[in-house]
Amino acid sequence: MSKPAIAFESVSKRFLWRQDRPRSLMELFLGAFRRQGGTRELWALRDFTLAVAPGEVVGVIGPNGAGKSTLLRIASGVIRPTSGHVAVRGRIGALLDLTAGFHPDLTGRENVFLTGALVGMRRQELERRFEEIAEFAGIGEFIDSPVRFYSSGMSMRLGFAVAACLAPEILLIDEVLAVGDQAFAHRCLERIQRLKSEGTAILLVTHDLGSVERLCDRAVLMEGGQQVAMGAPAEVISAYLERLAVGRRGLRHEQERRWGSGEIRLADVWLEDGAGERCPGLMAGSPLVIAMRYEASERVPGPVFGLAIHDETGHLLSGPNTRFGGLPLPPLDGCGLIRYRIPELRLQPGRYLLSASIYDERLVHAYDHWEFCLSFDIYPHASSPRCFGPLALGGSWEWVADGGEGG
């Protein structure tokens, strides 16, 4: 059995945070005559152990402040652990800050050769790989312009191209997969797959849970600098989303907005699972009920209740309403409940936003429009269909040998 390309053995990292750090020269001077405040210990990592084999992709997920980036910086040698040991076997390519090390007054071409030299590559090898790097970056004639004139996207594209094309034996990636348009992002994913097939050990830190499930052989969940779960990506992702959902009963989203004339209003909006219980999320492919309780201060003729499901960036995925769904409502007053039942929710695992509204029968006048009133999670399931994008269509494939013309 081959030795791991990179191994962490009981690694811990402590930072000292000085609470009375001076903010000006005068504060620094006066501080010499005052009683000094104390320092606070911050443990970014505690007793972390992990081994990554050649050709293996391991994804590291968790909330902000979990210690993920600290882990990669220790692996790359940028910082040293307070205790424990890291064994590295092979040349490292680190995508921690894509433009780190680029000199703004040098051209893209010159920065490629400078970066290659810094990681120990010979000029002949760099010349042989240069065209591949330039083609992968896709910045055209700007390759011979000073980097100071690049947009941030161009700089990141070149940074990824350099790091991914210099044949690393270990690749460390920190939140840099979305560095351009969709076509470039797809090339990045293809390059990671190719490096994996060539035996590169890859440690990937990202909040993109879909990439973890598609790319990784194993996943690690971190919280508070500690490893709390490790295993198959779908299982670890599910554990992460369930931990996020603990204590939530339909989380009000921080970007919620609301408007309308108010003759009839949404008193509450929530999700129900297949058993009719309120829930903060559910497994992919499970039945879902979205419930809306209303209160009308006066009689409202023929209102239309609507819903909208968005991805986490706010893009609309679907927007059903009672009018389109064939449920004409009589004039309403007082209180009541509207439910929208989905027999099998075909959203991919991830986090989504929900909006709810009440409009007049022409869908012009808003009585109550509650934008992003809830966020909810879809957890992966072992039998969930795997595909790209947020929506699983639920179709099936068919192959006909020598099928001739369709008809």
Image: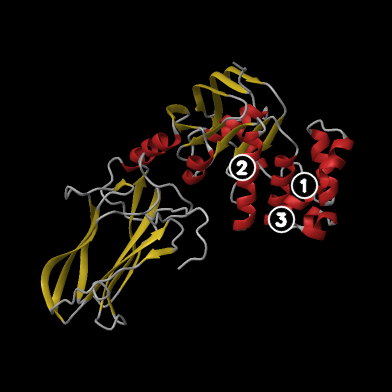
Disc 2, disc 3: CB below 8 Å?
Answer: no
- Residue 15, by quadrant, is top right
Q: Is residue 235 visible?
A: yes
Q: Is residue 19 visible?
A: no
- Residue 356, by quadrant, is bottom left
Query: Quick one: 18 or 278, which is closer to the camera?
Result: 278
Of labels 2 and 1, earlier in sequence is 2
Task: Specify the label residue 154 is tagged with.
Answer: 3
Q: Position of residue 264 (x, y in %)?
A: 19, 74
Pointer 1: residues within 10 angstroms few (<14), some, or many (20+)? Answer: many
Q: Position of residue 107 (x, y in %)?
A: 84, 52
* Direction right: furthest residue: 124
Q: Quadrant of the C terminus?
A: bottom left
Query: Quick one: 188 or 94, which is closer to the camera?
Result: 188
Q: In the rendered view, would you say 303 is above or below 346?
A: below
Type of residue at label 3?
A: Met
Pointer 2: residues within 10 angstroms few (<14), some, or many (20+)? Answer: few
Disc 2, disc 1: CB below 8 Å?
Answer: no
Q: Quadrant of the N terminus?
A: top right
Of badges 2 and 1, the one in the foreground is 1
Type of residue at label 2?
A: Arg
Q: Position of residue 65 (x, y in %)?
A: 49, 37
Q: CA distance from mark 3 to mark 1?
A: 13 Å
Of badges 2 and 3, the one in the foreground is 3
Q: CA distance from mark 2 to mark 3?
A: 35 Å
Q: In the rendered view, would you say 147 is above or below 67?
A: below
Q: Which residue is mark 2?
A: 23
Task: Specify the label residue 49 is tagged with.
Answer: none
Q: CA distance from mark 2 to mark 1?
A: 43 Å
